[in-house]
Image (tube, rainbow, N blue to C red):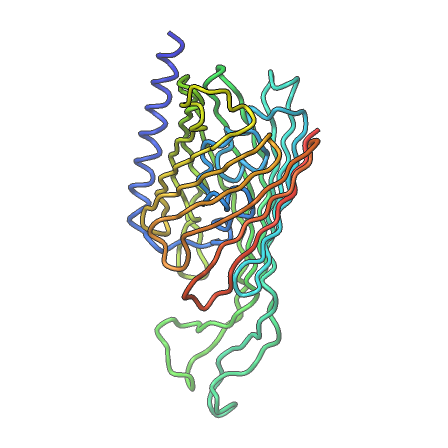
Amino acid sequence: MRNTSINKLLFLLLSFFVSQTMFAQQKLAQTGFQFLSVSGDARAVAMAEAFTTVEGQSGSLFYNPALIARTTKMLDAQFNLTNWIADIKHNSGSFAYSLNNGSWGVVGFSFQTVDYGEIIGTRRVKTSVDERGYVETGNIAPSAYMFGLGYAYSLTDRFAVGAQIKTVHQDLGDSWIPSDPKETEPDSVILEKTDNTLSEFAIDFGTIYRTGFKSLAFGMSVRNYSRELKYVREGFQLPLTFQVGVSMNVLDLLDRDLSDHAVLVSIDAAHPRSYPEYLNLGMEYTFMKTLALRAGYKSNQDEYGISYGVGFQLMGAGIDFAYTPFPDSIFEDVTRLSMHFEF
């Protein structure tokens, strides 16, 4: 009876998520706060972010909040450093705390900050003031951040759910815009100063289901669900993403004792609001739960697709590195470094 109820819940959740994302697809390429789409977790990125069903670490909050339900230690912490394109710096981190050894669930906290550096601000003026048609207004230092609070609970030994509510903020500095949007002539336009700062709440939600066949797991998640926002006159939404995935240690299929080795293969199908659908394919080989080699591939991408990484963990502490090349692109290759601790 309980399994029947869980199956019904899974069906209803899947129906809701699909209906929401089908509607969202009508506004393709019309999202803002894109920093929320940049992952900082080196382990996940090395596996092409095929992470919807990879359990056990607090960093899973960025992909599927339900995954922290089976955090094996009382406290799990992670910190990430990302050297993003155009010298943009992303810093992020996460914490997970197990309540009463997990019997009351697991609470989590996540954060992300972005340093865009400084750019020179300008505003339009009459050509009689400056023949260039604009003057400089000083340096602008855009910034953005996200803080999230999550909770996950294992309903059974196979099925877990989780959610995260987060506040997101972006400050793009001041700008000068025409008071009359129909006026385009520089000599006649009247400008007014506008503060381009927005804050909003968003919700992430996910489930994870262990099928009972070996280590095969199935999961789904929705990230960045919120209402529509607006800068001045143009409305947009956050980068809503619906994702489903499966994963398994494929060595479980062999009739041999290979406990010192593991080959995790993970596949995710992503349906974002911002881009066409794509697949994430990731693989991780682990030796004695200490050394890990990783690789991944993202389909249907313009600037990059392949990623690599390596990780090392010992006595509750670990470090992970990921490398994403941008071949035939004006952007430099991206590196990520993550540090992980559990107590």
Residue 80 in the image: state x and y as whole percent.
62, 47
Is 301 located above or below residue 73 in the figure?
A: below
Residue 275 in the image: state x and y as whole percent.
35, 52
Would you say 209 lies left or right of 110 here? Answer: left
Residue ID at (51%, 24%): 258
Is 157 located above or below residue 180 in the figure?
A: above
Residue ID at (39%, 37%): 267
Residue ID at (61%, 65%): 117
Residue 127 in the image: state x and y as whole percent.
46, 90
Judge by depth and name the residue closer to the eye, 339 or 156. Answer: 339
Judge by depth and name the residue closer to the eye, 266 or 66. Answer: 266
Judge by depth and name the residue closer to the eye, 10 or 187. Answer: 10
Q: Quadrant of the C terminus?
A: top right
Residue ID at (62%, 51%): 81
Q: Quadrant of the N terminus?
A: top left
Q: How many badges with numbers are in the image?
A: 0
Is 163 located above or below residue 21 in the figure?
A: above
Residue 89 in the image: state x and y as whole percent.
60, 58
Would you say 24 lies left or right of 121 here? Answer: left
